[in-house]
Image (cartoon, rainbow, N blue to C red):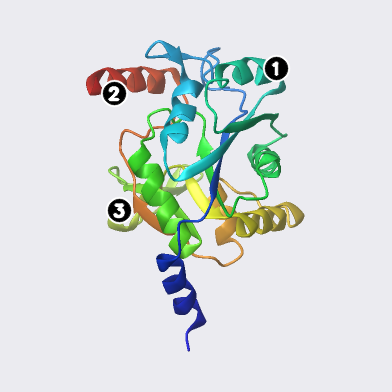
Amino acid sequence: MNLSKVSTTLRKILPLQYCGAVIVAAGNASRMGGIDKVMAPLGGEPMIVRTVRAFQDAVAIKEIVVVTRPDLIESITHLCSGFDKVTAVVAGGSDRPESVENGLKALSDKVKLAAIQDGARPLITEAVIDRTVRAAHTYGAAAPAIPVKDTIKVENGGIVKETPDRSTLRAVQTPQVFDFDLLRGALQNAKEKQIPITDDCSAVEKIGFSIKLVEGDERNIKVTTPIDLKIAEFLLEESV
């Protein structure tokens, strides 16, 4: 008997597990040219508010923890006062993995699935959240992704060493959703072994667990530079 297949089948027929979201907004926005992107206005309100609202409106999400810089805790707590799913606003750590861990610690004991979201992805939709949570419910780990449009080169010292097959490449977005205990264990493993990780999926991959990819959304951009903010503003205006 294949126990993995049995487990997957059981997950499919069981009610959707209780999912808590950790919205990570604790970076220093070093590439934003002096703009504090967490609080940057987008469509007349701070960007972080748009991100939080998407999770507030998502039926699959039961509670939310926002992780931010210590100097923004009071401001973001005030901004989130109208969102009843927000149970805590906590300080981030010295790096993203530590910030995620701080957020996970603040979730309630009810949480079985944890959705980790970049605070700087304000155009995330309920549809993407829902299908990623449902995939994680079935497979234990899931993330939205979109096909890569550009040809990617692997370089070393300015010299091209390899050109991967573009048809196999995907740009992974957030939320990345995991079995709660799986993610905690993966982050702890990466910390103990000092493994550099670029996202939460990579921590889970390092312990040999496969990630289920679901359809992402080209509009679900991450605001990293001032140009990204202008693009987000355009996309928001276009959708009105």
Q: How many marks?
A: 3
Q: Residue 166 bears which disc, if any?
A: 3
Residue 15 seen in the figure: yes
The tag earlier along the polypeptide, 2 or 3, is 3
Q: Position of residue 73 (x, y in %)?
A: 67, 21
The tag earlier along the polypeptide, 3 or 1, is 1
Whether residue 120 is situated above or below residue 176 in the rendered picture:
above
Task: Give the side of residue 231 with respect to residue 136, left or right.
Answer: left
Q: Residue at 46% x, 35% y: name it.
A: 55
Q: Amino acid at mark 1?
A: Asp
Q: Residue at 47% x, 32% y: name it.
A: 56
Closer-to-camera residue (139/159): 139
Q: Position of residue 215 (x, y in %)?
A: 32, 50
Q: Position of residue 96 (x, y in %)?
A: 63, 38
Callout 3 touching callout 1 (CB < 8 Å): no
* Nearest to viewer (mark 2 / mark 3): 2
Which residue is labeled 1 in the image?
Answer: 71
Whether residue 55 is situated above or below residue 31 in the rendered picture:
below
